[in-house]
């Protein structure tokens, strides 16, 4: 096992960095721990993660907060994409005296295993938006701001949204692409209630109409497809239920502050490099972005 020291990218006033890592089928990363903190979540695919001797299967939406002492390694038979955030330990240590009592479980405690959470798509998008802000700012203020956003998200994620079980099941079912394209009518059908009843329940639980909720889910799904695929933008918009490309562009820009094309270019350009991987039994340094597939 090896210990990874604090990288140069976290020196000279830089406290935090974010990269997107693409693992291909058969890639692995050998057993290691760190001199820094690490946070990652799976965007796409499936990762085999062994941490402190426990083997885990991580799927999209799984968030893990790794402490410097945690010993872990990765492998995959299918390939996966993760967002990985590294930060200086002083950033999280400085928060403990002020905020440790505000969350049910402190992510940087001495538990046997690191904290994990299974995030809903909307929670992943919220965390990604916070991570995006780190691209141009790696100061201590930015680092602590991101970690506070993470703590708030974990606190909300630990308590379920107060909504009827039938609505929760319907929203989960709506994430299937063929159902998402069908729109608000499909949500009503999945709920098995009248449109007025569904609208009242959605407004109480989510603070919006059923149509607004469906459009929000559609746009989050489109954003993930833009980041993780090279499918045509028009096809993505149509697949998410937008009959008009112009409508898709307007709605997407209003939600994410960028056109679908600009959003894709910005996210797919975010660090794809893996410092060192072990593939087929030997170390393979990767110092350039993954080729497009």
Image (cartoon, helix red, strand yellow):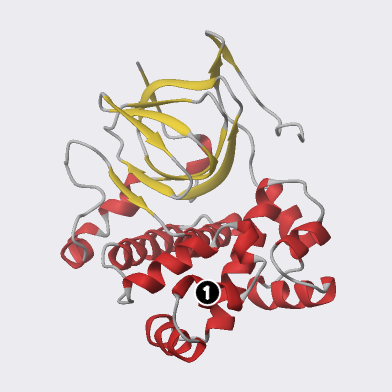
Q: Is residue 170 left or right of residue 80?
A: left
Residue 139 place in picture, x, y as percent: 48, 57
Residue 158 place in picture, x, y as percent: 27, 62
Q: Quadrant of residue 55?
A: top left
State whether residue 11 appears in this view.
no
Residue at x 46% of width, y 62% of height: 172
Q: Is residue 57 left or right of residue 229?
A: left
* 120 or 148: nearer the viewer: 120
Quadrant occupied by the N terminus: top left
Which residue, as the protein is rendered here, is positioned at the far top?
281
Secondary structure of the residue carrying numbered label 1:
helix
Q: Which residue is mark 1?
A: 189
- What number of labels is visible? 1
Q: Is residue 28 above or below residue 161?
A: above
* 254 or 14: nearer the viewer: 254
Q: Is residue 184 left or right of residue 156?
A: right
Residue 178 place in picture, x, y as percent: 64, 59
Residue 92 place in picture, x, y as percent: 31, 53
Q: Is residue 171 above or below residue 147?
A: below
Quadrant occupied by the C terminus: top right
Residue at x 59% of width, y 82% of height: 211
State whether residue 213 appears in this view.
yes
Residue at x 65% of width, y 69% of height: 182
Q: Is residue 88 above or below residue 101?
A: above
Q: Quadrant of residue 59?
A: top left
Residue at x 77% of width, y 35% of height: 292
Q: Is residue 104 above or below residue 207?
A: above
Q: Quadrant of residue 152?
A: bottom left
Q: Alpha-carbon neighbours of circle 1 within 10 Å: few (<14), some, or many (≥20)?
A: few
């Amino acid at each position: 096992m090896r210990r990874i020291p604090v990288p140069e990218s976290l020196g000279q006033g830089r406290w935090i960095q974010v990269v997107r890592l693409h693992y291909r089928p058969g890639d692995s990363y050998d057993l290691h721990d760190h001199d820094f903190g690490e946070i990652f979540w799976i965007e796409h695919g499936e990762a085999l993660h062994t941490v402190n001797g426990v083997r885990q299967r991580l799927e999209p939406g799984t968030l893990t907060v790794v402490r410097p002492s945690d010993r872990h390694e990765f492998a995959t038979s299918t390939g996966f994409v993760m967002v990985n955030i590294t930060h200086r330990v002083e950033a999280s240590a400085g928060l403990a005296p002020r905020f440790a009592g505000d969350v049910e479980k402190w992510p940087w405690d001495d538990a046997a295993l690191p904290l994990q959470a299974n995030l809903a798509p909307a929670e992943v998008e919220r965390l990604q938006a916070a991570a995006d802000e780190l691209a141009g700012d790696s100061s201590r203020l930015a680092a602590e701001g991101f970690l506070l956003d993470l703590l708030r998200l974990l606190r909300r994620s630990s308590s379920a949204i107060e909504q009827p079980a039938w609505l929760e099941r319907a929203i989960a079912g709506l994430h299937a692409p063929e159902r998402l394209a069908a729109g608000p009518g499909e949500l009503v059908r999945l709920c098995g209630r009248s449109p007025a009843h569904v609208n009242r329940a959605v407004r109480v639980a989510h603070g919006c109409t059923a149509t607004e909720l469906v459009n929000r889910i559609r746009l989050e799904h489109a954003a993930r497809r833009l980041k993780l695929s090279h499918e045509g933008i028009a096809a993505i918009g149509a697949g998410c239920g937008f009959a008009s490309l112009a409508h898709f562009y307007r709605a997407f820009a209003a939600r994410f502050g960028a056109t679908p094309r600009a959003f894709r270019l910005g996210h797919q350009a975010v660090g794809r490099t893996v410092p060192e991987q072990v593939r087929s039994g030997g170390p393979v340094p990767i110092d350039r972005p993954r080729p497009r597939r």
